[in-house]
Amino acid sequence: MQQQTRDTIVAEEGRALWVLGELVTYRVASEDSGGAFSLFEVVVQPQGGPPPHIQHREDEWTYVLEGEFELLNKGRTVSCGPGSLVYVPKGNLHTYKNAGQEPGRLLVGQTPGGALQAFFEEVGEEAFDRSVPPVMDGPPNVARIVEIAASHGIEIPPPPEA
């Protein structure tokens, strides 16, 4: 079923991809906003989340819908539950981690839209089954993911040495 708002038709279900173990559902694709912004719903498995990264082209915000998360932004890690909102200006190292024992849900928005969506398209796979992440053949090719991210203005620095 679709709902129409102004000149844009937005699918209620939205396109969904599995991206490195996370279910990413497009709520507003970049092209639906004329490139102004993108909005994604992200289901994060327990203890899951992306590596720390920096977007050099977009500002980002994360809103917790369900679950308990730890969000890194501007050198600080904060605990966030449902209703928490964290704004990340471009150029800041950030990440999130599902600190709970159940899957959690986030809304992640970016302005302008496009780069993160292009990254998802390149590294993700179509989510035909939205209930179970696909089985991976082995560990992800980190060097390739870092390279793809960089091509979209996303820097994934190496982890600090222990």
Image (cartoon, rainbow, N blue to C red):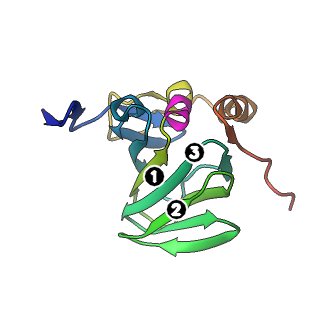
Residue at the spot 49% in from the left edge and 45% down from the top edge: 111
Q: Which is more N-terminal, label 3 or label 1? A: 1
Q: Residue furthest right?
A: 161
Name the quarter where the N terminus is drawn: top left
* Label 1 crowd (10 A; few <14 / some 14-19 / many >=20): many
Q: CA distance from mark 1 to mark 3?
A: 22 Å
Give residue 77's quadrant in the image: bottom right
The image shows residue 160 at horizontal and vertical percentages of 83, 57
Which is the main secondary structure of the residues drawn in magenta?
helix
The amino acid beneath tag 2 is Tyr
Residue at the spot 42% in from the left edge and 33% down from the top edge: 30
Give residue 28's quadrant in the image: top left
Choose between 42 and 85: the one closer to the eye.
85
Does the CB distance between marks 3 and 2 fall below 8 Å?
no
Q: CA distance from mark 1 to mark 2?
A: 19 Å
The image shows residue 152 at horizontal and vertical percentages of 63, 32
Q: CA distance from mark 3 to mark 2?
A: 11 Å
Name the quarter where the C terminus is drawn: bottom right
The image shows residue 56 at horizontal and vertical percentages of 67, 44
The amino acid beneath tag 3 is Glu
Find the magenta span and give its range: 114-119
Q: Which is more N-terminal, label 2 or label 3? A: 3
Residue under pointer 3? 58
Residue at the spot 41% in from the left edge and 48% down from the top edge: 42
Q: Which mark is residue 87?
A: 2
The amino acid beneath tag 1 is Val
* Label 2 crowd (10 A; few <14 / some 14-19 / many >=20): some
The image shows residue 40 at horizontal and vertical percentages of 39, 44
* Secondary structure type for disc 2: strand
122, above or below 105, in the image: above
Residue under pointer 1? 44
